[in-house]
Amino acid sequence: ALRMQRVEVSIELRKAKKDEQILKRRNVSLHVKDENVPPGQNSTHKIIQLSLEEIVEGVNANSPKLQLLATQATRRMLSRQKDPPISQIVQLGIIPRMVEFLGRADNAALQFEAAWALTNIASGTSEHTRAVVDGGAIPALISLLSSPHMHISEQSVWALGNLAGDGPLYRDALISHDVIPPLLALVSPVTPVGFLRNITWTLSNLCRNKNPYPPLDAVQKILPVLVCLVQHEDKEIVTDCCWALSYLTDSCNDRIQIVVDTGVLPRLVELMASMNLIVMTPALRAVGNVVTGTDQQTQAAINAGVLAVLPRLLRHTKPEIQKEAAWTLSNIAAGPSQQIQQLITCGLLPPLVELLDKGDFKAQKEGVWVVANITTGGTVDQVVELVRSGVLKPLLNLLSAKDSKTILIILDIVSNLFLAAEKLGETEKLCLLLEELNGLEKIENLQNHENSLVYRAALNIIEKYFSGEENSDLEPQTGQDGLYDFSVEKQEFDF
Amino acid sequence: MELSDANLQTLTEYLKKTLDPDPAIRRPAEKFLESVEGSQNYPLLLLTLLEKSQENVIKVCASVTFKNYIKRNWRIVEDEPNKICESDRIAIKANIVPLMLSSPEQIQKQLSDAISIIGREDFPQKWPDLLTEMVNRFQSGDFHVINGVLRTAHSLFKRYRHEFKSNELWTEIKLVLDAFALPLTNLFKATIELCSTHANDASALKVLFSSLILIAKLFYSLNFQDLPEFFEDNMETWMTNFHSLLTLDNKLLQTDDEEEAGLLELLKSQICDNAALYAQKYDEEFQPYLPRFVTAIWNLLVTTGQEVKYDLLVSNAIQFLASVCERPHYKHLFEDQNTLTSICEKVIVPNMEFRAADEEAFEDNSEEYIRRDLEGSDIDTRRRAACDLVRGLCKFFEGPVTGIFSGYVNSMLQEYAKNPSVNWKHKDAAIYLVTSLASKAQTQKHGITQANELVNLTEFFVNHIQPDLKSATVNEFPVLKADGIKYIMIFRNQVPKEQLLVSIPLLINHLQAESIVVHTYAAHALERLFTMRGTNNTTLITAAEMAPFVEVLLTNLFKALTLPGSSENEYIMKAIMRSFSLLQESIIPYIPSVITQLTQKLLAVSKNPSKPHFNHYMFESICLSIRITCKANPEAVGSFEEALFLVFTEILQNDVQEFIPYVFQVMSLLLEMHKNEIPSSYMALFPHLLQPVLWERTGNIPPLVRLLQAFLERGASTIASAAADKIPGLLGVFQKLIASKANDHQGFYLLNSIIEHMPPESVDQYRKQIFILLFQRLQNSKTTKFIKSFLVFINLYCIRYGALALQEIFDSIQPKMFGMVLEKIIIPEIQKVSGQVEKKICAVGITKILTECPPMMDTEYTKLWYVIPLLQALIGLFELPEDDTIPDEEHFIDIEDTPGYQTAFSQLAFAGKKEHDPVGQMVNNPRIHLAQSLHKLSTACPGRVLSMLSTSLNAEALQYLQGYLQAASVSLL
């Protein structure tokens, strides 16, 4: 059996996943009193509304006061709850100027407002992000990480996170500008939780995306900190760490090995068992990725206790969790027979049968793969155990599924079962069992399936196990008396 | 070929000739067209004709010819010449869509098919503008054109329903979605609006509804592989409209036809399919809409009439509800007492009613009625769907549903009681309701296996079923009689035995009913009751309990075969067989009459055998008559031969293929009953049994082998003396069988009988050949089954001819052959041998090889003691867990139970052969035999055996061997 990497086809018909981690975030309404004040109501804090023209003017003015006012107004527009005018702001061409403001170490307020505005511009589309990068923001933001003002370095962390989240290009640009050392330097026992959340999120974006993977040395620098942060008691920090680890493990076996070597697996398995969906989701993904690796890596996940947690996840009410859990199990089942044995010993067959019977369809499909892998890589005894667990009934029911691939895999499973039955001399028994469970009828009907691979597979089973076959070279001729001639050519024998 | 009028004219003439009924004119014309179809412009000439010809018949003919031409030639096969020139291809693609759309429907369909064939090859890469061209027509407002486009799109996209996910496929689907999904959605909305503007225009509505059906089908195809982003975003539009279409009715769309589904039904059916697709695959996203669909679908059910044309819609709709109500997260939709009551009252009860169509089938098409009602081929019926819904609801709401239905059952029974002859259908529905409510799981073999404990089945039986069956008039209310009998049958494991015993004479009485369904059910119910198991694997109902009824049972069963419509009723014949098997010797007094009736029946049906099950049970009954009678009186075999051989000869002479396997089995049974030398009447048949034509039919093989074995057992010496020239033919049969993986075991059965029974000198000259043949199979295509049989055979040979003879013949075929077979086949494979007798033969044979074959002691074969110890393999064979012996299950046998699919219909359980143990007399306990043989060997060469054992066997094996030696009270020297 082959372990399956996460992505099968690169084309998606579906909407992007809803439970993915957020790529870019806007900093919205941090200071409530700034925003949402109904018009006409007197406020102690005077709101200055500027037009776009006034903003351009103010930003380009020489007066630091005007610069601040204009930058603040820009930031405010970009921070409003609904429809921030990012494109319009970008078109004003003021980004280079904002970047320039980042360097005003003498004017912390201006630095902060500019960083905030740039954060929110970078949170838009790729084009918006590009405008920020093209404006030269990368080195400026990185140097702000070391700002003596915590709120400024925190805002830069955020902005950098948005840049990294755009994709591998800017992620690597940040890394080659040496973003990592100053970023990691911000992590300390006294860093406030809110700040740590931002840092962790940015780190996770630096680990994110394939084609290419993030540079190896960057990963090696980040990992020890992630391993440390994943022990934190704050759920958001832990969640983002898990996302980061899930990105690092969604990769080739060498990369998986680096993560396994940190010894973080037991913690990930512990988090997989969390009752909290936002924690459980990325932890499950990370562990699921690890078991796509080598037999040893999979064994490490088994040793960390993954098999004890999976039964509950297979029965989870959320379809996506069921599916991920079943996918994880399918890759464990793709291992050597000892691992399949552990899967059986740990009681995974009953929840698997349940899932095949009444799970969500996406999960059922993965469940079918589990069965396929056990019948490919398992010993005859294990296959017998599988059949005893009652897997056949729900499995054969799925021959009516509205998905050709699933049907084909089930037919492959049936062929595998016959191979095992032949070894036991119980072909006949299996034939009867398939018939009893309405499987034979279904397979016979599949000989009329529109998909040629499906009907050939069905035909093949019917021909091979439900009818006969001849050795024509030994067939006797008919002699002069009209009876069979008894004769044979001698050949060399070597058994 | 030029695009000229002259060519058009010629083509027209040839096309006309292809329609000529006279093959002498038609064939040459077809040939001609084929010969010119490779020419450039040929397809364009056809397109011109189908557009412009004056004669409609030529237009249609040209369009069909064109489609077939495309089908044969469009695909470009690798390494083969392109059969259509490029400029024609371009011209076809440029013109075909508008041409299709402007053609009348008959031609439009052909062109639409052609487009989808071309599309399969060229779309999307080589036909990039097809989609835009089609989509643009949506705005035409001409629904004749729009339907043409939709139909074509449907034939292009429907493959998404069965193809595998792949990058290529999904890229195409994505492209289609980008270009098509939005226009389709807009068209959908516009069409629905037009439906309300034209709500009073019948002909417009018909066209619009045809469009809606196609749109709904396209929706299904486009949503099949995965849930596209577009449709997820527009689920509101689609589902809201689908939902309102489900609830829509318009008198103008109602059809008068009672059988054929109309547009409205077809559309609603497709919408049910679409909803089911979403519910099955995209449950998470569809959840918000599902409750509405549940409501709409049950409202639909409430308002849909009883006519046959609604059957598919109704059963689809009910099945949808049944599949939803079983899911835990939709439980709440059904929970409310009012909801449950209304589903029960308005959906389930009405669809359980016995309709006019059912009544018609009951009377005029009873075979079909029985098949549906009894054997469960009722998947698409309303009753079955309603029954499934009851079961689905009972998963979570067994108590409330049972409660609601109890009320209904009572009131329906009261209605019946008021005026039975008018209201009998109420009772029928009540019984059906009780049945579907009470039965949770069912098999053909055991009836109901799991029942609803809230229903008191016995009480209902005593109060409402038995009274009907006790009525003196067996022909009154036949449907209720059938219901009652069926009730006994399916609840036989729930109703106490004393009630069953009370029912038996009632069932026997109903064998006389005129209604085919009633007497068939009575026979079937008796047959099922007779197969029920009591304690100790015996029958629940004993022969002693049946004693008072033997005569009336047999009389009524055979009389039932004379009732109109039941002369070949398989249920009755099966009941006859089962009765014989149950009653055993108490049928003997009736045998003379029984066998006369059976042979007459046999003679009659052999003219034209048409009911395989009937025939099978008839032969089983004949076998039972023979066995039961001859067991008590062996001499009686002669009178059976006298009664049967005449008919058998006729069957063999007329080559009635269906019956020949049976005849051979009955003859085997008869021959085996003889205690002495083979009668000459059988010997005369021997050469005929070797005829290849008989062996070419797989169904003949097992019974013929069995018969030849009987010949060999009783008449080997007669064959050797009187038919020695037939021995090669006999071995030829063996060779034929051994060549087949399916039949090789039969070849071994035959070979074993030859080796066991034929005098050695009569087969001497063939022995080497036999082994060469077997080795060849072993070398080229061995299977586990073959090896198992092979192992048994060589050990049997060893026992019969001696171990030395075995070694000599092996080594004469090829030097060191004996060692190779032992090392490569016997030792590694011996543990696969199954069956007590088979294992024993192997044990005795191997013991002989070990202890009675001198080369084992003083040639290189000593390695089979030291290096790869044969003895250890033998001990392994002994100490493997034994296969469970098969109990005497013959009485309970069913056709479906007999193994082997090829011979499924020919193997007679009651012609059964007794197990034969060829070493039975020689060796009782093979372990003791081994100990004694080793002892003997050690006496002959003292010291050697002990040293060989101690160096080669592992500790465990040695310990076992010690045990054997002790049990035999011998020790090794």
Image (cartoon, coloured by chain):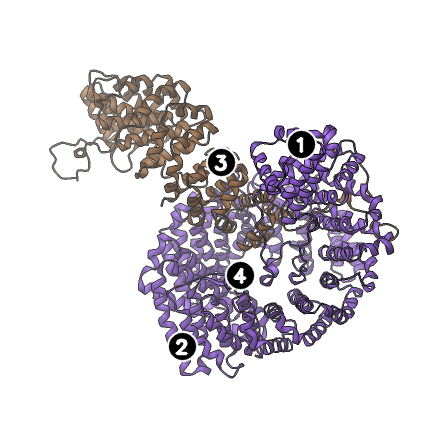
Amino acid on which disc 2 is placed: Leu
Q: Is residue A447 above or below residue B334?
A: above
Q: Badge 1 is on which residue?
A: B945
Earlier-in-chain disc, 4 versus 1 = 4
SS at circle 4: helix
Q: Quadrant of the N terminus of chain B?
A: top right
SS at circle 2: helix
* Contact check, label 4 and label 3, Cβ < 8 Å: no
Q: Tell me the tag on residue A313.
A: none
Chain of the residue that carries numbered disc 2 in the rendered image: B
Q: Badge 3 is on which residue?
A: A8
Chain of the residue that carries numbered disc 4 in the rendered image: B
Amino acid on which disc 3 is placed: Glu
Instruction: Judge depth for marks 3 and 2 and give the one in front.
Output: 2
Q: Is residue B153 above or below residue B586?
A: above
Q: Badge 4 is on which residue?
A: B537
